[in-house]
Image (cartoon, rainbow, N blue to C red):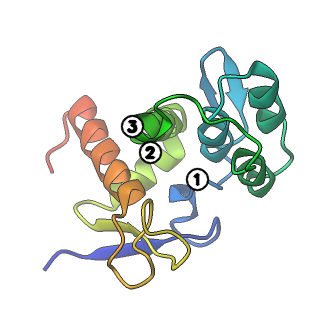
Amino acid sequence: MTETIHFYEAAGPYACLSNFARYPIKLDGRTWPTTEHYFQAQKSVDPAVQSAIRKARTPHEATRLGRDRELHLRPGWDSMRIAVMEKAVAAKFGQHEDIANILLETTNAKLVEHTHRDRFWADGGDGSGKNHLGRILMQVRDELRRERGLSS
């Protein structure tokens, strides 16, 4: 049976899997404090909005700004949000060797973002959610293995 690793909070042994974990990434010519900052900023095409989100003091504040109902979403956002998250997560683990090793040490475990607050990125708290973040992490783990010539 495959082991399952649940994560959510930016604390504990798998805290680095959370988008709220404080691992800056360099993407699109800028440094973003977390993958959550990058992801939320990409919802807008307005450079001022993106800059405000990038400068948010915490990932929670970045999320609040990115979810603002006054924010005009980037055209086609729903169809591109998974690719944006893939790009951010790949950058995070590609730019931080310490957490790349933690991700690789999960071997073949199923990675599940476990929270009732999200049914798209997480498991919905009861396993019925889509767990897209967990799937992306497993995909990035496989890519890291291939790059390093490791077997699965």
Rounded to the nearest angstrom, the CA distance separating label 3 from label 2 is: 28 Å
Query: Which type of secondary structure does the marked residue at label 3 adopt?
Result: helix
**Residue 86 seen by the camera:** yes
The crowding category of the residue bearing disc 1, from other C-alpha atoms within 10 Å (few below 14, some 14 to 19, many at least 20), is: many
Q: Which residue is mark 1?
A: 19
Which residue was labeled with disc 2?
100
Identity of the amino acid at label 1?
Answer: Asn
Q: Quadrant of the N terminus?
A: bottom left
Q: Nearer the viewer, mark 1 or mark 2?
A: 1
Q: Position of residue 100 (x, y in %)?
A: 44, 45
State the residue in front, 9 or 45: 45
Q: In the image, is residue 94 above or below residue 6?
A: above
Read off the residue under disc 3. 79
Residue plotted at (42% across, 61% down): 120
Mark 2 secondary-structure assignment: helix
Sequence order check, earlier mark of 3 and 1: 1
Q: Which residue extends farthest top?
A: 29
Going by the numbered disc 2, the residue's amino acid type is Ala
The percent coordinates of residue 5 (x first, y second) are: 37, 73
Q: Nearer the viewer, residue 106 or 39?
A: 39
Q: Is residue 90 something one can see in this rendering?
A: no
For this view, does 76 lie left or right of residue 148? right
Q: Residues within 10 Å of mark 2 (few under 14, many from 20)?
A: many
**Answer yes or no: do the residues labelled 1 and 2 have beta carbons within 8 Å?**
no
Frontmost residue, 122 versus 105: 122
- Furthest-bottom residue in view? 126
Measure how far apart labels 3 and 1 are at the Cα level: 20 Å
